[in-house]
Image (cartoon, rainbow, N blue to C red):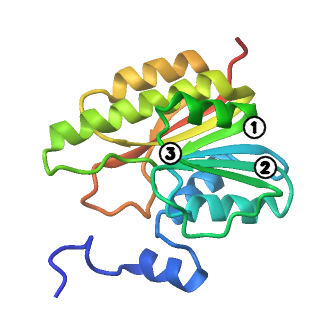
Amino acid sequence: MAKNSYEKADFWTLKAKKEGYPARSVYKLEEIDRKFGIIKPGQRVLDIGAAPGSWSLWILKKQAGRGFLSAVDLSPLKIPVNEENMFFVQGDLYDPAVHSQLAQRGPYHTVVSDAAPATSGNRSLDTDRSEAIVEAVLDYAAQLLLPGGNFVCKLFIGGGQRELLDRMKGLFTTARAFKPEACRQESFETFLIGLGRKPE
C-alpha cells in the first residue's frame, strides 16, 4: 500500500505513462507554456536539470523538428537524443566546462529548469539548496538569454522567494510565481516565471 501520494500513481503519473513521457512533470511545463507562451517553434531552448527527459521530450515535440534544444543533468536522460536538433551533456551545471559547452550552443530564446536538490527531509535545508539552484539557473539566463527571452525555474518555497523575484525583475519585464495544477497538493514547490529578457 502506498504510504503517501508521492508513492501512489495519480492522474498525472498515469497520463504521462500513457502518453510516453518519463515523468508527470511534463504537464507542469505544458500548463505554464499554455498560460504564458514560454516556448515557440523554431527557437533555441536550454533545459537545465533535464533528467529523466519529460520536459525535453515535450519541447522537442513542440519544436516539430525546428529550433534546437540543449540539455544538462547529472543523470542520463531516458529519452533518445537526436543530435541534429538536440545536445545533451551529463554533468554538473556548476562545472565551468559544462557551462562552456552550453554557451557554445547559445544564445537561447528560453531557459527552463525543473532541477531540484536531493531532498534531505529538512525543509529549511532543502529550500536553501533549491534557492541556490535557482540562483545558478538565473546566472545562465543572465548570460545566455537573448533579449525578449523567457525563463521558467522550479523553486521550493522558503524564505528567499522575494529576493529571487526582485533579482528577476531586474532581468525581465515580467517576473512572477505560478503553481501549476499538476503539482501535488502537499508539495511546497512553485515555478518562477520570467517573461521578456531586458536588453543589457
Q: Nearer the viewer, residue 3 or 192?
A: 3
Query: Mark 3 — residue?
Result: 91
Q: Compute the Cα span from label 3 to label 1.
A: 16 Å
Q: Is residue 52 left or right of residue 101?
A: left
Q: Position of residue 108 (x, y in %)?
A: 73, 35
Labels 3 & 1 near each other (Cβ < 8 A): no
Counting residues from the N terminus, which is met first, the one under dot 2 or under dot 3? 2
- Note whether residue 104 is visible: yes
Q: Label 3: how many residues lie within 10 Å, few (<14), some (14-19) or many (20+)?
A: some
- Note whether residue 106 is visible: no
**What amino acid is labelled 2 in the image?**
Phe
Q: Is residue 166 left or right of residue 195?
A: left
Query: Mark 2 — residue?
Result: 68
The residue located at (28%, 80%) in the rendering is 8
Q: Compute the Cα span from label 1 to label 2.
A: 9 Å
Q: Secondary structure at mark 2?
A: strand
Counting residues from the N terminus, which is met first, the one under dot 3 or under dot 1? 3
Q: Nearer the viewer, residue 131 or 83?
A: 83
Q: Position of residue 29 (x, y in %)?
A: 56, 56
Q: Is residue 130 left or right of residue 33?
A: left
Q: Position of residue 190 (x, y in %)?
A: 39, 46
Q: Secondary structure at mark 1?
A: loop
Foreground: disc 3 or disc 1: 3
Tell me which corner region of the image, top left, top right, bottom left or bottom right, holds residue 130: top left
Q: Label 2: how many residues lie within 10 Å, few (<14), some (14-19) or many (20+)?
A: many
Query: Mark 1 — residue?
Result: 105
Labels 1 & 2 near each other (Cβ < 8 A): yes
**What amino acid is labelled 3 in the image?**
Gly
Q: Secondary structure at mark 3?
A: loop
